[in-house]
Amino acid sequence: MRDYERYIRYRTFPTPWCPGCGDGIILKAIAMAFSELKIQPQDIVVVAGIGCSGRLPTFFNTNTLHTTHGRALTFATGIKLAKPDKTVVVISGDGDALAIGGNHLIHAARRNIGIKMILINNGIYGMTGGQVSPLTPQKFITETTPYGNIEPKFDTVNLLKASKASFVARETVNRPIPLKQVIKKSFQHKGFSVVEVISNCHINLGRKNNMKDPIAMSRWIADKTVTQAQFEKIPVQEQNTKYPVGIFVEDKERLEYTELYYKHIVPTTQAETIKANSTAKRQKK
Amino acid sequence: MKKLKADPKGVLTGAHYLDGDYALAEGALAAGCRFFAGYPITPSTETAERFSERIPKVGGVFIQMEDELASIAALIGAVWGGQKVMTVTSGPGFSLMMENIGLACMQEIPLVIANVQRGGPSTGLPTLTGQQDMMQARWGSHGDYEIIALSPDSPQECFDLTIEAFNLSETYRVPVFVMTDECVGHMHEKVVIPPADKIELVERKWYKGPKDEYKPYKLDKDGIPFLVKAGDGYHFHTTGLTRDELGYPVINSDCQDVVVRHLVEKIRGNADKIIKIEEDQIEDADIVVISYGITSRVAIRAVQMARKAGLKVGTLRLITVWPFPEKRINELAKKIKAFVVPEINYGQMVLEVERCSQGQTRVIGIPHCGGWVHDPDDIFKTIQEAAK
Ligand SMILES: Cc1ncc(C[n+]2csc(CCOP(=O)(O)OP(=O)(O)O)c2C)c(N)n1
């Protein structure tokens, strides 16, 4: 058994994912990141909402919470505040994170609460069978955009930047080693971190858009993947069709939320109480 | 069920002049609540404000979340982190919490939600009273489940019943609602907070067995499963899906049958132990006024008027609203002429009284659409009519 397998809960296999799904690559990358950073299973909590991606926690041999659609970050906020010393990881789909849960995403970023989010962007609602998501590319055919998607997708990186996120990165399932590396980096970051992972849903997105097998979708992802330097040279009107990869924001200076709470709020109020009590005592005398 | 004494740190022992909203917070702190997540909404906001000031002083957490969906979710997360938790809201926020109330029932999460009710539907009467979320409390989330709901009639009871709510939630691992209203929430009265060693608390059902044998949903002798904290090495999984003893999803009707029966029966089967009612002048009564919360204080006046007029009237006050005291209502229905049921809604709990009476007596509701309490005269007139 390789060390990262300690983090995998084999008893809950098989997974519910379609053959060739990118979720498996991400599962392994996360497990390897845990293992290489030597974070012990008992010190990890993995939280997810609902979706194909929402099933990932089931397969980690740690503390795992499968919650409700879009809300994983808020459950994780509770856990992190109750257990600030634990590594709290949230796994979310693009619909989960940016449609139903979009509000929670920007607020978690704004607070800079030390949750490590893996945002699996397969460009579609996978679990419900292929409806449009806020990250579906324009013109794509889905079950609910039979004439092509007319909505632009969110620019996740800039959305998060504007929300004051302190760590933002993007990778793709085509590049498992850089993926693992960037996940490791995000796990070492103290504040809120997001790694968006471009993944393949050939069944529900690819099939309707002339990419019905995993290879075709991987090629499409490869074609869209650019470095940040390359991205800068692309005409602005085409930028939203590409996926620049790498780390976009890494702010180590900003204080993490639970640290602020326990180091600032709690001792301040307790000092006040002690002061108030001693004045009260003096007055009694 | 292990009993503990309250931690003196959270107990503000003494006689105070508090409103119901503040008393809710003090009850929670006395009960050991150290985690509050909420979203401001009239007429419950004062409770949140009180928590924000008080809870850090006892080392606890206050967080104002981005909405009520997030608030209850943070509570559930914090319970898996080992905390005792509470939030407070009113109608619109209660509606937003419904999905995750279902999750809390499914995952068997001990938590307390106070609903300081106002007039609805929709934004309704933000600053005025109502008792219109009583059925929502019972049936608001989807699927079959049971919860417990209590209804305080004074700031003192806001304090006492919040402690009771925590104890019930720990005993049965279930969400417990303190269904108060704007009137009680904003009413200032004397609230006596006893010394910590006079406050009895139920300890959480912590699992203490071997780490690799923990099964999150294996029932103990009392029919309630054990809890653990994330980070203590138990490696549990929990989900909102129908699950087996290990907490892993099992999607079929056999497993569903086991899970749903358990969620319902752990409350129904213990209803006699859970239910608290208060009866007065009931021995010779041939009319019984059933009420709860602020309405029961108005009912007292009406009953005084009726007794003065020579009518044999008694009162039954629901302290526990859910589960409903069906046995007692049925028993009384056999003996009396009529039940009179005033409530600040268009007729909710009166339906339960009708159901439990099984046609053995008359049941007369006195609806009130909200915004104010009943006029005692109206209740008195209905009693007179019932006596004819
Ligand atoms: C409140 C609510 N609305 C709708 C659903 C149905 N639902 C389940 S998963 C899902 C979308 C999943 O898409 P995404 O988040 O992108 O994850 P993926 O399945 O692609 O990994 C929806 C709409 C739900 N479970 N809960």
Image (cartoon, coloured by chain):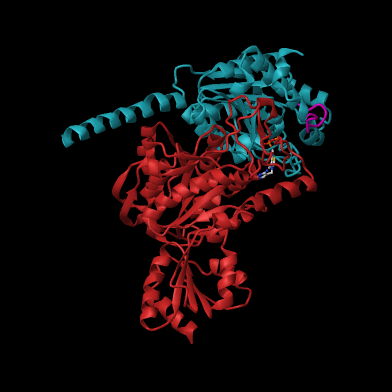
* Spot occupied by residue B388 in the image (x, y as percentages of width and height): 49, 87
B246 vs B343, left or right, is right
Which residue is depicted at the point 79% across and 48% down?
A: B253
Was residue A18 drawn as part of the magenta stretch in this picture?
yes
In the image, is residue A7 above or below residue B363? Answer: above
Which residue is depicted at the point 38% across and 33% down?
A: B58
The cyan-tinted chain is A
* Spot occupied by residue A191 in the image (x, y as percentages of width and height): 50, 22
A64 vs B148, left or right, is right
* Spot occupied by residue B7 in the image (x, y as percentages of width and height): 41, 36
Residue B348 seen in the figure: no
Which residue is depicted at the point 30% across and 54% down?
A: B190
Q: Colour of chain B?
A: red
Was residue B339 drawn as part of the magenta stretch in this picture?
no
The quarter of the picture where residue B130 lies is bottom left
Q: Looking at the image, in which quadrant does ligand 1 appear?
A: top right
In the image, is residue B153 above or below residue B220? Answer: below
Residue B163 seen in the figure: yes
The quarter of the picture where residue B189 lies is bottom left
**Range of the magenta residues?**
A13-22
* Spot occupied by residue B272 in the image (x, y as percentages of width and height): 58, 58
Residue in front for this viewpoint, A232 or A279: A279
| Secondary structure mainly formed by the magenta segment | loop
